[in-house]
Image (cartoon, grey):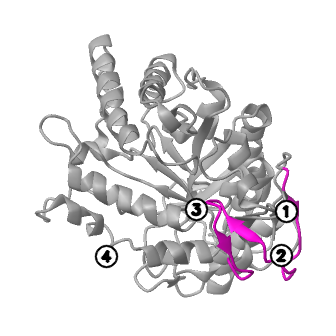
Amino acid sequence: MKRITAIHLITVFFLSSPLSIVNAQTPQKASDIASLMVPGWNLGNTLEAGPCTWLSNDLDWETGWQPTRTTQKIINYVRDMGFRSVRIPCSWDMHMTSKHKIKTAWMRRVKQVVDYCMNADLYVMLNDHWDNGWIEVDGFKDLTEEKIQQKCELQADMWTQIATEFADYDHRLLFASMNEPNAEDDAITSGALKRYHQAFVDAVRATGGRNVERVLVVQAPSTNIDYGCTVNVLPEDPTPDRLMFEVHFYGPYNFVMMTEDADWGYMAYYWGKNNHLAGSNHNATWGEEAWVQQELRKMRTKYTSKGIPVIIGEYGAIYRTMPEGESQEKHDASYRDWYKAVTRYAINNGCVPMVWDTNGSNSVINRTNCTIGCQFSYNGIMEGLEAGKWPFTTDIDEIGNGQIVNSKCYNLMGQPVSDSYKGIVIMNGKKVVR
């Protein structure tokens, strides 16, 4: 990938006339759009929050786990910072009436947030995210036929409602069956998961219209890379080439999640071959660059090389303030290099990296004031984006930053845009990364 600045890391498309535009209404294969979603960002701890019983109105749950309501300004800032897709974790069952119908006001708010992303020319992945565990947890506790069938029916009912409401949205909107289903690599739990995914696919396709061609995303058991390579949970889809697979990446545990030393091992403050601190007990002893590359290579071998794109739906690590005697500088470099490595090796293996972000001073994006929250994670993502190279043909040429865009540019809806427009445009029948 040619060297371009982070602020301009936006994919653009060009065509000579709006009459010949393959516009946003045209169905696209999963493999056609995967590279256009890189990099991705999560609107975390927001529309999936709850139950927040201290708030009387469930519309206010959006700020139950973080302080800021989502606005068009926030989503525009995410786009301007170089992200090309947004994963929207969302709860639905918690916002239903006693008759299992999604509340009108909740559906309206979710659609408003999706529209913010559409307005910003971003791809969107909308899921059912934890949702008080109604299927992701409870769906694997009682695995009798009666209970599995009951969950399949509820899954189909819920997704029928969602798909119907979003039926007119173009191919930039993807639906994702779950978040982190509590299944493993055994026949019983993975078998149940496959049935839940099948209920999801069948329900969406049955609503017709654009949902027949919409890209759908299904999750590995526990979104675990190794489980995803061991068992097959891909459902049957009557529409070919419209499925993506999702895993999450939170490793090595000592560096990304561990919050205190244990008798079996230390927290890792320092990660990466260039960032170890001499004499410290808190250097990573496993899971560094070669391991990240190896883990993500599994997805290429199993899925992406066979035409099934993979979404790294979440990845992230805890940022730490170093205690006395440790090196903040080396930790900061470790943090940056971890994000760079995961982003880079995801791209190199045909995976879409979508960073987990929950809002605040140490988040990638601080939504409260539309600034970069943590420069180290953001820089790592953008450096990984620059270092990575999508491994499969995308029919997109690359030009260096600073080249002048022909004035006859159009957005995906066929509307003329100026040379300074940042986002998705089309010109001269050529797809170009500027």
In the displayed structure, would residue 242 be above or below residue 400? above
Q: Earlier in the sequence, mark 4 or mark 1?
A: 4
Amino acid type, mark 2: Asn
| On screen, residue 64 above or below 98 | below
Relative side of 431 to 302, left or right: right
Instruction: Give how far apart the Cα atoms at labels 1 and 2 are.
Output: 9 Å
Question: Mark 4 against mark 1, which lies toward the viewer?
Answer: 1
Q: Earlier in the sequence, mark 2 or mark 3?
A: 3
Badge number at residue 406: 2
View extreme (front): residue: 19
Location of residue 204 in the rendering, given as x and y in whole percent from the top left corner: 44, 31
Cα distance between the residues tagged 4 and 1: 45 Å
Q: Which mark is residue 122?
A: 3
Q: What secondary structure is the stretch in magenta mostly built from?
A: loop
Q: Distance between the residues labelled 2 and 4?
A: 42 Å
What residue is disc 4 on? 67
Mark 4, secondary structure of its residue: loop
Viewer-side label of 2, 4: 2
Q: Which kind of residue does numbered mark 1 sit on? A: Asn
Check disc 1 and report the residue beneath it.
Answer: 428
Contact between marks 1 and 2 (CB within 8 A): the answer is yes
Residue at point 35% right, 56% down? 110
330 versus 231 height, above or below: below
Find numbered disc 2 in the image and state the secondary structure of the residue it sits on. Answer: loop
**Amino acid at dot 4:** Pro
